Image (spheres, coloured by chain):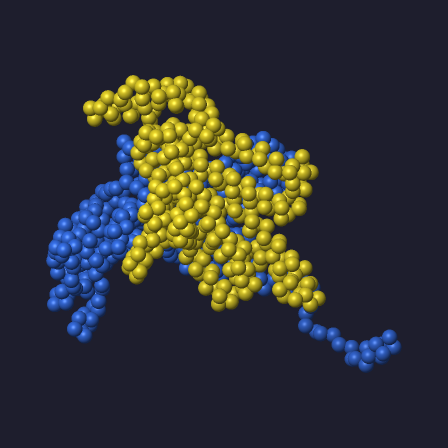
Amino acid sequence: MLGYLAHRLLMMIPTLLVISVFVFIIIQLPPGDYLTTLVTELQAQGEEISQEKLEFYRQEYGFGEPVVLQYLHWLWGLLQGNLGYSFEHEQPVADVVGDRALLTIVVSMGTIIFVYVVSFPIGVYSAVRQYSAGDYALTFVGFIGLATPNFLLALVLMYLANEYFGTSIGGLMDDHFKDQPMSWAKMVSILEHLWVPVIVIGTSGTAGMIRRLRANLLDELHKQYVVTARAKGVPPGKALIKYPLRMALNPFIADIGNILPEIISGSAIVSIVLSLETTGPMLLRALQSQDMYLAGSFLMFLALLTVLGTLISDLALAALDPRIRLGADLAK
Amino acid sequence: MSDATQGTSDLKHYVNDRPFDPYSAVTLSPEQEKYYLASQWVLMWMKFKRHKLALISGIYLVLVYLSVVISEVLAPYSFSHRHTDFLYAPPQDVRFFHNGEFMGPFVYEYDVSLNLEELRWVYTENTARPKQLRFFCTSDDYAGSTYEFWGIWESNFHIVCPAKDSQFFFLGTDRLGRDIQSRIIQGARISLTVGMIGIIISFTLGLVIGGMAGYYGGWIDSVVQRVIEVIRSFPALPLWMALSAAMPVTWSPILVFMGITVILGLLDWPGLARAVRSKLLALREEDFAVAAQLMGAKPSRIIGKHLMPSFMSHLIASATLAIPSMILGETALSFLGLGLRPPITSWGVLLNEAQNFSAVALYPWLLYPAIPVIMVVLAFQFLGDGLRDAADPYK
């Protein structure tokens, strides 16, 4: 198991490196470097940028150096936990982000838990009672969930909440907790507000999960060994849980690698609509003002989150399935 | 044993005098012949037909895509005409009975007044003034009837249009008084093409890259695998957002449209490439592939002529399932204001109006463009499901 863990951790390094190159390319994409744009813009407004500031920016990002050096500069900063400097806010990115990063993780984790908790029983039910009225109804709801873009769901929910309950469901905490340090009361307030974004973001993932679990379980249930077990009089519950369910569970766990990017994508846009205090709205603002280093840090953070999530799912899978961990040990 | 011999001797010897055809078990009835001799594609069609929901979805999609050709004619108004007297007008109900009397489809005209407290226009139906709808009309006697077909030919032929000097806002109007129904019909043109062009790009890329990885294996395969892993580990939407935000502001809307399509297509190929690769890995070991190789066929010929046909149907099915994600991607981007820009009109651009929540609370009909999005995405899902089931007709 330890060997497998080490193997997986080592595998992450090249992946993350390639991701960082991608992110850096995106940062560099807008024409001209940010500094020149900034200077001309300020000059157009009749303002003069101080020489010290220019020098500071130049140092922070190595502007004027060859692109490769700039990249290394940036990467080195990242490795030291220096997320860079936001031009728009004139603050280090780490300060701008604040606990938004933490809240993003909270929302994503909450959504994943929601997806698994909801889709597991429904998926099993749909497979065991295939073609029953309940199965049809759930399949139908699932299809709608898959087809509805989640930002629309957020808008509709907000509209309905406003129309029928007269409340606003936006935000992730009560207003007076904003800009306050994390405390127990704030935590509770966050948990109270969490359910709306979690449901909105999780719906399509849940729908997909249910469909896949149902298909996998159905495949297993039609196999000979299940028929044999039934014929020999194994009680239905045991004949379901003992083997077929365990077999179908593997892809279910492995799927986290698929749904995590989806959830993080979804949370980015939903948090913009619901104006949550996560990284989503900030990413949008950074992109709109072409504050590319800030945006790049967010992208890097989101990608890191996905890679870590995939790692966790792989580890869970290895713990669950001896073939995987032994296979990795053998391969070594 | 003795019983058995006893039994046979009791039976009279019997010979059927009908002519005997030794191949009777082998010859096929016409129906069987049709089935057994049918080509792969015919079999797939037979299997697909049984999936009613997929069939209906397919027909629906064909109709929607056909409508794109004549959007201007289907819409009652030119999509950019501003009815300045009718800002945020609510949808008008189509009625059939006026004072209990049947008079065909008509709408009541709006009386407009200003609510000074909330500072908004109030529209009330004037039941004294029913205005009959007209069909297949070529009149320019109402505002906004003239349009340029595909931006070239000027015309004012519409399938449905309001009465003379009257209005027909089936789905209401927006902030600038533009008819939402007309704009939705017009938006289909862009929203649906984005999906199609995007899928063509990603399909080509997936086929070429996945094909190379699967056929050659070795280091090409490992590089491709790594790249796929990286792209898949990126959350798609933030990446799309970043790429489309990186497009220069100076680009014209058409150029932006092309850019968005390319971005959507460029990031979608890994799924397809993966499918192609795994199929190729399995198939290239088959005898017929080895035989072709021994006879000196070039890799491109082996892939294109021998291997591709056996998994093309699967690819088409998965491509169909990938189109919705592109349509949704474009919608999300434009909704955020990072995607297409007016005057290009797509469903996402229309929904951009609904981004402001207070507008939605007051004017919920701004959300109508969401309905075609959901319908089209659903239809693609069903169609894709049906195609996937039919993709392997020999199973």
Seen at 81% across and 81% down, the residue is B10
A322 lies left or right of A314: right
For the C terminus of chain B, which image quadrant?
Answer: bottom right
The one nearer the camera, A246 or B265, is A246
Question: Which chain is tinted blue?
Answer: B
Q: Picture coordinates of residue B290 (x, y %)? A: 64, 38
Q: Position of residue A57 (x, y in %)?
A: 35, 23
Q: Nearer the viewer, residue B249 or B197?
A: B249
Q: Which chain's colour is yellow?
A: A
Q: Position of residue B214 (x, y in %)?
A: 57, 37
Instruction: Tell which of B308 and B249 is nearer to you.
Output: B249
Left or right of B231? Residue A315 is right
Residue ID at (74%, 74%):
B15
- Specify the quadrant of the image occupied by residue A222: bottom right
Question: Quarter-wise, where is residue B98 in the image?
Answer: bottom left
Check the image and report above or below for B162 versus A278: below
